[in-house]
Amino acid sequence: MELNTVEFNLGEALDAIMMQGMSLSRERQVPLVRDWPAEVSSMFLYGDNLRLQQVLSDFLLNALQFTPPTVGSILLQVIPRKEFIGTGVQIVHLEFRIVHPAPGIPEALVQEMFHHSQGTSREGLGLYISQKLVKIMTGTVQYLREAERSSFIILVEFPLVHDTSRRGFHLQEKSVLT
């Protein structure tokens, strides 16, 4: 599979992901919360934005599906880290966290995400494909299970095309979507 490499705005991609989860969020009565620095919304990256949206939406929708109604919210958090790799060239390391209340995704489904077999469920196949797409993007996926919450942790990096954010401006953009 080849990735479609184009210039894209990360903020627009994240908005699309949140919108894809809205109907299930309303239906299941589980609020979606977003948390990322304001600079993220103005980053222009070079990569496959549609595949990024596909995999993050799949992880988000699975978190929504396995979060009991009215128990808590689901957080989509983005943690960027810029690295200069040459004259005027920057890479942005992005850590996406999709945090949801425990108990989280069933263990069998988490195993299907990393190991494909004949009896894999539809959800497991979707997670497996998403995990493989992240690998193709030279990224990684982890699933962390804690006492009170569970998290998908997706690490990827993209070349930064240009950054229209103001230097030193680090307001957190945090909102609850219902």
Image (cartoon, helix red, strand yellow):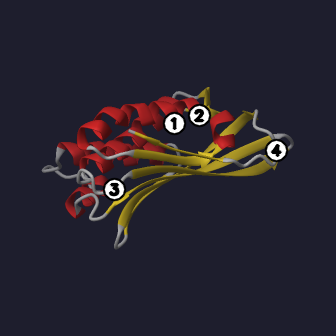
- Which residue in the protein does label 4 denote? 167
- CA distance for labels 1 and 4: 21 Å
Q: Quadrant of residue 9?
A: top right
Q: Which numbered disc, 4 or 2, marks the residue that appears first in the sequence?
A: 2
Q: Secondary structure at mark 4?
A: loop
- Which residue in the protein does label 2 denote? 11
Q: Which numbered disc, 3 or 2, marks the residue that appears first in the sequence?
A: 2
Residue 154: x and y in percent read 48, 52
Q: Which numbered disc, 1 or 4, marks the residue that appears first in the sequence?
A: 1
Pair 3/1: label in front: 3
* Label 2: few (<14), some (14–19) or many (≥20) C-alpha neighbours in 10 Å: some
* Label 4: few (<14), some (14–19) or many (≥20) C-alpha neighbours in 10 Å: few
Residue 119: x and y in percent read 13, 50
- Residue at horizontal 36%, vertical 63%? 150
Q: Secondary structure at mark 3?
A: loop
**In the image: residue 20, left or right of residue 88:** left
Pair 3/2: label in front: 3
Q: Secondary structure at mark 1?
A: helix
The residue furthest left is: 119
**In the image: residue 107, left or right of residue 6:** left
Label 4–label 3 contact, CB within 8 A: no
- Which residue in the protein does label 1 denote? 14
**Residue 86 shows in this picture:** yes
The residue furthest right is: 87
Amino acid residing under circle 2: Gly
